[in-house]
Image: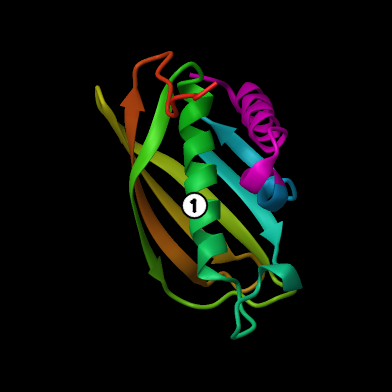
Amino acid sequence: MADNEEGLRLSRQIKNQRTSLGGFEANNLKRLRILSGGDGNMVCEMDVLPSDKNSHGTLHGGMICTLADAVSSWAFHVVERIQVSVSTDLHVMFMKPAIVGSTIVIEARTVKRGKKMVFLEVTIKDKEKGFIVAKVSHSKMILDVGTKLVKSKL
């Protein structure tokens, strides 16, 4: 078990590693602020920007899915740093829209870790008003260390 300070350090290290690789995570998740982490849990916050909105002017559902996937995966990998995992299921219940200009809090926790699967939960809330924006259940398959997800043609 990581203590709070060590868990927070590891959480930030994992976020920085993942967002430094370029691509989708780097473009969308660098501005997440990690508030706490360790022992399979993580809490982050993020300001909702105009670039995050859908055609209704609220936080895009795809961004909610991305946040839930990334933060819960990072929470798991603070404990299981050498493991490779892939998402098998992401179930989202959209409960109330977050508006541009608000700050959301993303709370992820590891519910159960089995031999080949891990089950995680995420709650996304409006920081100021406290209402739940979305509830997410996330399942991931744990792969053998060294497993390559894409075969290179080079």
- Closest to the observer: 142 or 124? 142
Residue 115 in the magenta stretch? The answer is no
In this view of the protein, which residue sits in the foreground, 57 or 11? 57
Indicate the position of residue 138 as horizontal and vertical percent values.
36, 47
* Residue 5 lies in the magenta-colored region: yes
To which residue does mark 1 refer?
Answer: 68
Residue at (66% x, 54% y) in the render? 45
For the question of whether residue 62 can be seen, the reply is yes
Q: Can residue 32 be seen by looking at this rendering?
A: no
* Quadrant in which residue 88 is drawn: top left
At a point 59% along the width and 74% down the height, the residue shown is 98
Is residue 118 placed above or below 35 in the rendered structure? Answer: above
- Highlighted magenta segment, given as a residue range: 1-26
Q: Residue furthest left?
A: 115
| Residue at the spot 24% in from the left edge and 22% down from the top edge | 115
Q: Is residue 107 left or right of residue 53?
A: left
Specify the amino acid type for callout 1.
Answer: Ala
Image position, residue 69 (x, y; %): 48, 48
Image: 33 above or below 15: below
Residue at 41%, 14% (x, y): give it: 145
Badge 1 marks a residue whose secondary structure is helix
In this orientation, which residue lies closer to the viewer: 84 or 110?
84
